């Protein structure tokens, strides 16, 4: 990496903390800290949810699949879009209409204290394990570009995310996610454009494997894709980081719109993300597939822009990490600390407590990430266990949003049965080194090993859903938890304010200044390089023009009473 690359990274990190500081001015109470005062613009929540799906694995795992198998990687990522559209249509508005402050509040109403403890601690451990592997993967990927010690890189990356999340709360998460979306989109489109201009398409199909352009492969077939849509429907519809975004907007209609934006973005953008490794396969056919994305980027990016790619990869994982830190800090503050330890806590105490929980969770996350390489490949075990918990945990929660019969006992039975059946098949039989040829279980072991993805769909999706249908059919009467939820919903609707709120320019101004500064920096880089100058100048000019158009729209929408406030003012309007 060159000096311009390091300057780019420095500007990016400074930008994160500027946005976090401005967001902190809006964080005067626990609702602002963990639900943005239910006043987040729907588009900010939608883009934040979009970014929450990203991690270093987006570049490493899916980039590797694109390089090895071709367009099936695009099809797999498009499944997120279908799942998000379904979640928007079926559940996003319903979550917002409940009138709860956190998803854990719903769990306690619906399933009682037992359900709150079971789901909170299980999902907390699940997310720390999963996100720690993503943080470790990011450090491994980026240490290859920057001369840093791996442990120091993990601590550095983790600390940056913890600090800006702790300072600005959910507003900081939302606004930095928007910045990260801009950076990620710009750099990916730029790399794709440069790869297209530098690729010789004559004979391209002869230089890539057969079936490279097919949407499915033997390993990732239609059954897997349908299962992937189903799994991610439950994730986007019930995982607390996504539910938090449905709760942060003003109305059920806005919650739906945020999920629809998320879905549409995932329908149209995967091809652009996957183009670099797809095209790189036609140029170089024998590289480590997990490094294909970064190698493709290095092959075309001029000085300064590799630093922006570094920032984009950091953004992908930082968004996931900050989302999980904020949502679980909110749960621990609102649903454990306040009711069980300090029922009369003031707003300032709750905000301080939330920041302490953010720091503690961040420390646990960084520690887990540091331990991953010391476990000798156990990250694959962690990822497998993490994936086995997805639908068994999220399906019962989502089912309880609609069902009036199912109770906590049924939820726990479904979750534990599905998890342990999957665990037994995955590691007790398929991954058991003691089962060798000649053993009666050997044919089953071979079958499970050769059909891992499909078995995960059957055990991880069909089994829990089948059990829930069976419980629903057999149960009689109404569970007391559904009565509590209905009463809370009625009370929240009766006390809700239905007047229209004035336009709040804060989020739009953050986007405007992000576009302006990023565009100006790309223009500067364009004038200092000799290669790809036209591409850089074009992108920089478009970004600055977009900032100017947005500035005009803000001036049109901002009420006269809010105009005396200075630009980038952190205070609330109206």
Image (tube, rainbow, N blue to C red):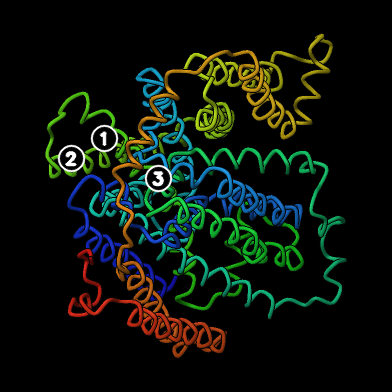
The residue lying toward the viewer, choosing from 426 and 412, is: 412
Residue displayed at 42% across by 30% down: 486
Residue 15 is situated, as x and y percent measured from the top left of the image, at 31, 68
Residue 473 is situated, as x and y percent measured from the top left of the image, at 65, 17
Q: Quadrant of residue 367?
A: top left
- Count of marks, rendered view: 3
- Seen in the picture, residue 108 relative to 314 is either above or below; the reply is above
Find disc 2 in the rendering and name its residue: 350
Camera sees residue 60: yes
Residue displayed at 37% across by 50% down: 248
* Numbered tag placed on residue 244 in the rendering: 3
Q: Are marks 1 and 2 in contact (CB under 8 Å)?
A: yes
* Horizontal side, residue 198 vs residue 219: left or right: left
The residue lying toward the viewer, choosing from 439 and 382, is: 382
Q: Quadrant of residue 366?
A: top left
Question: Label 1 vs label 3: CA separation?
Answer: 13 Å
Camera sees residue 378: no
Q: In terms of sequence position, does the residue under pointer 3 or pointer 2 come before the other?
A: 3
- Seen in the picture, residue 134 relative to 296 is either above or below; the reply is above
* Horizontal side, residue 129 vs residue 410: left or right: left
* Horizontal side, residue 421 vs residue 164: left or right: right
Find disc 1 in the rendering and name its residue: 334
């Amino acid at each position: 990496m060159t000096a311009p690359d390091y300057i780019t990274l420095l500007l990016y990190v400074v930008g994160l903390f500027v946005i976090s500081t401005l967001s902190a001015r809006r964080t005067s109470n626990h609702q602002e800290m963990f639900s943005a005062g239910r006043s987040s613009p729907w588009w900010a929540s939608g883009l934040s949810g979009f970014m929450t799906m990203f991690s270093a694995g987006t570049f490493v795992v899916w980039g590797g699949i694109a390089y090895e198998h071709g367009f099936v990687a695009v099809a797999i990522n498009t499944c997120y879009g279908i799942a998000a559209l379904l979640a928007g249509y079926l559940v996003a508005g319903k979550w917002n209409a409940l009138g709860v402050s956190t998803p854990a509040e719903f769990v306690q109403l619906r399933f009682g204290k037992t359900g709150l403890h079971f789901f909170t601690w299980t999902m907390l451990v699940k997310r720390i394990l999963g996100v720690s592997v993503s943080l470790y993967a990011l450090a491994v990927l980026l240490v290859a570009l920057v001369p840093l010690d791996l442990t120091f890189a993990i601590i550095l990356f983790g600390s940056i995310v913890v600090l800006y999340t702790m300072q600005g709360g959910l507003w900081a998460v939302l606004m930095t996610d928007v910045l990260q979306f801009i950076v990620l989109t710009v750099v990916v489109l730029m790399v794709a454009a440069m790869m297209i201009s530098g690729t010789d398409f004559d004979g391209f199909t002869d230089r890539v494997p057969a079936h490279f352009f097919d949407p499915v492969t033997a390993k990732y077939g239609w059954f897997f894709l349908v299962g992937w849509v189903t799994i991610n429907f439950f994730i986007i519809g019930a995982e607390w980081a996504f539910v938090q975004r449905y709760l942060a907007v003003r109305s059920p209609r806005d919650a739906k719109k945020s999920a629809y934006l998320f879905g549409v973005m995932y329908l149209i953008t995967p091809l652009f993300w996957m183009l670099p490794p797809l095209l790189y396969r036609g140029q170089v056919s024998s590289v480590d597939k997990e490094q294909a994305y970064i190698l493709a980027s290095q092959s075309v990016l001029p000085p300064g822009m590799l630093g922006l790619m570094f920032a984009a990869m950091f953004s992908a994982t930082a968004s996931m990490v900050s989302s999980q830190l904020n949502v679980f800090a909110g749960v621990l503050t609102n649903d454990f600390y306040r009711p069980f330890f300090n029922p009369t806590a003031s707003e300032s105490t709750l905000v301080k407590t939330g920041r302490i929980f953010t720091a503690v969770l961040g420390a646990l996350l960084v520690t887990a990430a540091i331990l991953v390489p010391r476990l000798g490949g156990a990250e694959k075990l962690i990822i497998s266990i993490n994936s086995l918990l997805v639908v068994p945990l999220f399906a019962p929660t989502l089912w309880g949003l609609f069902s009036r019969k199912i109770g906590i006992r049924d939820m726990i039975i479904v979750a534990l049965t599905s998890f342990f059946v999957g665990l037994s098949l995955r590691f007790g039989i398929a991954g058991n080194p003691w089962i060798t040829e000649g053993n009666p279980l050997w044919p089953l072991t071979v079958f499970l090993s050769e059909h891992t993805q499909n078995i995960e769909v059957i055990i991880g999706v069909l089994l829990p859903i089948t059990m829930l249908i069976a419980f629903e059919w057999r149960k009689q009467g109404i569970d007391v938890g559904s009565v509590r939820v209905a009463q809370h919903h009625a009370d929240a609707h009766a006390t809700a304010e239905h007047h229209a709120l004035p336009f709040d320019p804060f989020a739009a101004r953050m986007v405007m200044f992000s576009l302006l500064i990023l565009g100006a920096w790309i223009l500067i880089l364009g004038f200092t390089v000799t290669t790809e100058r036209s591409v850089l100048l074009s992108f920089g000019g478009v970004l600055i023009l977009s900032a100017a158009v947005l500035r005009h729209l803000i001036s049109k929408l901002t009420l006269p009473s809010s105009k005396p406030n200075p630009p980038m003012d952190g205070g609330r309007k109206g």
